[in-house]
Amino acid sequence: MYQPLALKKRMLNKLYRFLSRPFIVIIVMIIAPILSIADRNFGYFFGLFIALFLLWKSDWYWAKFGFGKKISLSTILKGLLLAIIIFVVVDICIQPFLEIYFGEIDLSSVDEIRGDFTSFFILFIIMWVFAAFGEEFLFSGYYMKHLAEFFGDTNKAWLISAIILSIYFGISHNYQGTSGMIAVGLASTIFFLTFYKNRNNLTLLVSAHGFYDTIGLTLIYLEKDRIFYEWVLNLMKN
């Protein structure tokens, strides 16, 4: 019994050392979108599995992924403020024009929550777990942070990493159409630049992401998500 367990432990440690090499993050980022061709969730969970494995084998060293500060009310409130700012800038001021010139954003994947509170509440919980926490943990805490460290862990390296991840994250939302990719890319640029300035406080990004998506999901549930687009159209007609 001892030998199989010892062998398993050695294999896991060997795998951890291999996956901890700086260049591995690039390989994971290449493989993930390839897997997403079959199903867009495959790439996400592949990357998330790698990140969680590294977190587990590091004895749950959360600072390795940007969680270097304790959760505080101040951070949560800053996240809410950031979410509102991003929503106003991107969703209200920019997104309607993107949809006018590049076509409407495809939100058919969440159409079931329109007017249905049960579906809305279930998706709300899923969103906070897999989008707010999961995506920030993966795309910011693993991809962006480790890519920046691969590039030299300088301010310039972090900035380059933020730009790359903004494009990468936007393209990962290609199922929303051209307007969706651009809008998500713009919003994520603000998120990643915020992480660039707050490298040890990923909780700020998780809360901001959660609040931002909460606004969007609530408008879809209330069937008011087209209100700003229609408002801009009416302004242009007048």
Image (tube, rainbow, N blue to C red):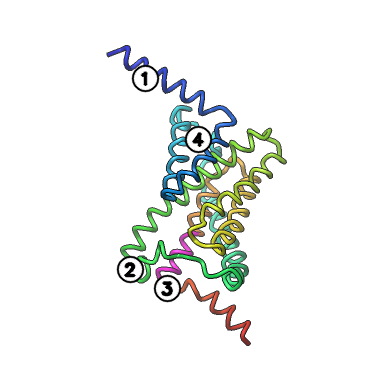
Q: Name the residue tied to disc 4.
A: 62
Label 1, residues with CA under 10 Å away: few <14, some 14-19, many ≥20: few
Secondary structure under the numbered disc 2 in the rendered image: loop
Seen as rendered, the residue at the extreme top is 3
Q: Which mark is residue 223?
A: 3
Q: Position of residue 119 (x, y in %)?
A: 33, 62
Q: Is residue 33 left or right of residue 97?
A: left
Circles 3 and 2 in contact, beta carbons < 8 Å: no
Which of 210 and 112 lies nearest the eye of the viewer? 112
Q: Which mark is residue 8?
A: 1
- Answer with mark 3 or mark 1, whichever residue precedes in sequence: 1
Q: Main secondary structure of the magenta part?
A: helix
Residue type for callout 2: Asp
Residue type for callout 1: Lys
- Answer with mark 4 or mark 1, whichever residue precedes in sequence: 1
| Stretch of the chain drawn in magenta | 213-223
Q: Is residue 148 left or right of residue 224?
A: right
Q: Name the residue tied to disc 2.
A: 116
